[in-house]
Amino acid sequence: MTDSGRSNQESLSISIEQDQEEKQSGSFSPVKDLRWLVLDLIFLMRPTQFFPIWATLTAGFVVPQVSFQSVSFFSIGFTSDFWLTLLSVSLGSGAVFIYNQVEDVESDFINGKLMILNFGLITENVALWFGHSIAAVSLFIAASVSYELLYIYIACGVLGLAYNFYPFSLKNNPYSAIVVNALGGFLCFLAGSVSASDSLTVLIGTAIPYGLAWGAVFALVTVPDQAGDQKTGKKTLTVVKGEGFTRHFAFWVNAVAVAIAVYFKDPVFLFAGIVSLPFYFRILKAQKGSGIFFPVKLSFVLLLLGSSVFVPVFFILNSVNFAICRLYYRFRFRLDYPSFSAVQ
């Protein structure tokens, strides 16, 4: 899938790539250790970023059934096609996150993030080969599910490559970067719908709020990285237009997303959007550089919970991922991450 932001785009403790998930802990420096190799490779995929991706994907699976069928709370179960879709989306997203890290090593080092590459626990060459491998597996699984899903993946792959690499490097333009991340959320929702609906065209309107929300969140989480991005010449919306403009942009785009969700009567997005929107409004007057991550985390946690109301196993899945991530970061980097903290 496309970049969720620094994302595409991090719920239970979602950091969407900008959370200070990987701030270096004092003078502690982990060392390369073959006993950690498999886990280091897995966490190079950034499973902490899977929360919003899984939440959007599951919403795509749930909403068509809520809209077009008579379903009640706790009554929807995942199909085998959905489990395969979830696996392949995770692998594809992980590949894009790896490519993004390889391209952003310098700015990530300045911002104190993404320690696996910065500490040399995995070399850039190994990271790229691992990314290529899991991307190929992701496409193979998608093709086994349906051609519609494969086409969505191909679109995501093209966007991901154009986003990260020369000659396009769309991430280096503040506006194209937001559009690509918005398309990532839009396509992620549709990918979840493949195994739940016979016609994706009727769901295009329903997918729009998710795309808008991803684009808004991506723009907002560029705020904390403004200093590092300026030093390395990256042109994010915050660098080009300023922090105040970015905060207003995120609020109003989310407001439009909620209005569209009202029109399409999407209960999952409305639950997350209506509850979290006041907190996006609150950051308009928050102290400079503060308050960014609370509404971001809250909105995706609520999206996760909204989907879990219909698919309880989804909550269990996220809880397991959360626990494993906590254990890895505690024992590998001595960090309490991920967390529910609203501190940025």
Image (cartoon, rainbow, N blue to C red):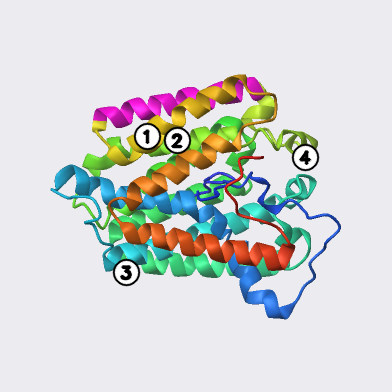
Q: How much space separates mark 1 and mark 2, taking CA atoms? A: 6 Å
Circles 1, 2 touching at the beta carbon (< 8 Å): yes
Q: Amino acid at mark 3?
A: Ser
Q: How much space separates mark 3 and mark 4, taking CA atoms? A: 42 Å
Residues shaded magenta = 243-263
- Assess disc 1: are there few (<14), some (14-19) or many (≥20) residues with their C-alpha within 10 Å of its C-alpha: many
Q: Say which element carries label 3.
A: helix
Q: Is residue 248 left or right of residue 20?
A: left
Q: How much space separates mark 2 and mark 3, taking CA atoms? A: 30 Å
Point out the residue furthest to the left here: 70
Of pointers 3 and 4, the one earlier in the residue sequence? 3
- Residue at the (56%, 37%) spot, across then down: 294
Of pointers 2 and 3, the one earlier in the residue sequence? 3
Q: How much space separates mark 1 and mark 4, taking CA atoms? A: 32 Å
Of pointers 2 and 4, the one earlier in the residue sequence? 2
Q: Say which element carries label 1.
A: helix
The residue that disc 4 covers is: 232
Q: Main secondary structure of the magenta part?
A: helix
Q: Quadrant of residue 101?
A: bottom right
- Assess disc 4: are there few (<14), some (14-19) or many (≥20) residues with their C-alpha within 10 Å of its C-alpha: few
Q: Amino acid at mark 1?
A: Pro
The residue that disc 1 covers is: 209
Q: Marks 1 and 4: which is nearer the front?
A: 1
Q: Amino acid at mark 2?
A: Ala
Of pointers 3 and 1, the one earlier in the residue sequence? 3
- Residue at the (45%, 59%) spot, across then down: 318
The residue that disc 3 covers is: 144
The residue that disc 2 covers is: 213
In the depicted structure, whether residue 81 falls above or below residue 16:
below
Residue 79 pos. (x, y %): 26, 65
